[in-house]
Image: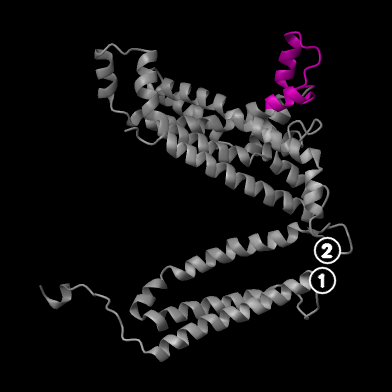
Amino acid sequence: MSNGDLLHVVTNDNISPRRKALGRGIIWGSAALMAVIAALQTLQVTGHGDFGFVNWRPTLYAYCLWATCLCWAQVLLHGEHGKRTLFVLPAALFVVSLTVFPLLFGLLIAFSSWNLSSPDGRQFNGLDNVRQMWADPFYWNAMWNMVIYCAAIVVEYAIAFGLALLLNAEIRARKFFRVAFLLPLMLSPVAVSWMIGKSMLEARYGPLARLGRFLGWDTPSFFGTPDIAKFTIMAMDAWTYIPFMMIMILAGLQAIPKELSEAAKVDGANGWRNFWEITFPLMLPVSITAILIRIIFKLKLADIVITVTSGGPGGATDTVTSFIFREYRDRSNVGYGTLLAMVYLVVIIIGMTILMKLAERWTRPQT
């Protein structure tokens, strides 16, 4: 093997103690400077002093200085091995700046009274927003609506599974139906809201309202009563996202070897028994994945509600996201709306973690 064919092997560098001390000093010194500046700005924001800061740029500059020193110190402390770290560390620090800092700033706003229409600006108010949240029936009504909306995913999954089985069978125009059933997924939820909610379901001149009057419904109103409005919103959202679940299940069905079904038919497992004992167990991992992703989409449901009903009538169709949106847009209540969003984020994280743990247990192979 020639010298040009040899791989470059990174060996441990002989780094002097003085160089290591310099690297550690750079890290801890820049970190201490950033901590001091951030603490002083926090004290000023909470009204415990005035240190002359106009905005949060000094903390941002201190973070950039600390990030640069941290990257430089990796080379000082680890030599060639530290240079390999630089392929990942700057990107990780950039992600932290885009996630951790906005989260911390959101927490600061959540415990403040900040109404955009008030001339006083943002004022720290402690736990007042938390007390207001506990006593807010509209917020908890929106939370309960989300439970109902998520429970409807079971029906959506059954419909999606049935459509996937149909499209997986040998039927005429199968390719056409696959494309046709995917069309709702290609549309924006806002477009669906206007085409269906604002046009087809319009109470006076909408075609479905006219059909309802023709069939004997005296005053057809799809958004006038709470139960009908909630069912209509769920139907519109389901029509948009059932194709997503269907295409995932269809991909799983096509991955099942045909030899299994043929062997089951030889053993006498036909129809329902073949589905329940072979197809459905094999599709369980794909089904759970599709349901979990659908739950994530459902928890973000807002655009259809905001466009069509604005949460009405009387909050019957409200979701947590649409309620928070109105706190910002209609009431200009940034502090309270941010607290609601933070609480909802915690609920989502806890709920999805529990569901993923249960899904892992259900899909674990039985020994």
Label drawn at residue 123: 2
Q: Is residue 308 at all visible to an observer of this figure?
A: yes
Looking at this view, name the residue that lies furthest to the right. 119
Label drawn at residue 140: none
Of 70 and 178, the residue lying toward us: 70
Residue depicted at x 24% and y 75%: 9
Q: Secondary structure at mark 1?
A: loop
Looking at this view, name the residue that lies furthest to the left. 1
The amino acid beneath tag 2 is Gln
Residues under labels 1 and 2: Cα distance? 8 Å
Of 360 and 180, the residue lying toward us: 360
- Percent across and percent down for residue 258 are 28, 24
Of 177 and 123, the residue lying toward us: 123
Looking at this view, name the residue that lies furthest to the top. 216
Quadrant location, the C terminus: top left
Left or right of 365 on screen, residue 144: right
Residue depicted at x 60% and y 27%: 152
- Percent across and percent down for residue 30 are 57, 81
Q: Residues within 10 Å of mark 2 (few under 14, many from 20)?
A: some
- Is-magenta flag for residue 222? yes
| Label pair 1/2, CB-CB below 8 angstroms | yes
Looking at this view, name the residue that lies furthest to the front. 367
Q: Which residue matches tag 1? A: 47
Q: Is residue 170 at all visible to an observer of this figure?
A: no
- Percent across and percent down for residue 307 are 72, 37
Quadrant location, the N terminus: bottom left
Q: What is the basis of the colouring in this image? A: one colour
Q: Secondary structure at mark 2?
A: strand
Q: Quadrant of residue 116?
A: bottom right
Question: Which stretch appears magenta?
Answer: 204-232
Residue depicted at x 24% and y 13%: 266
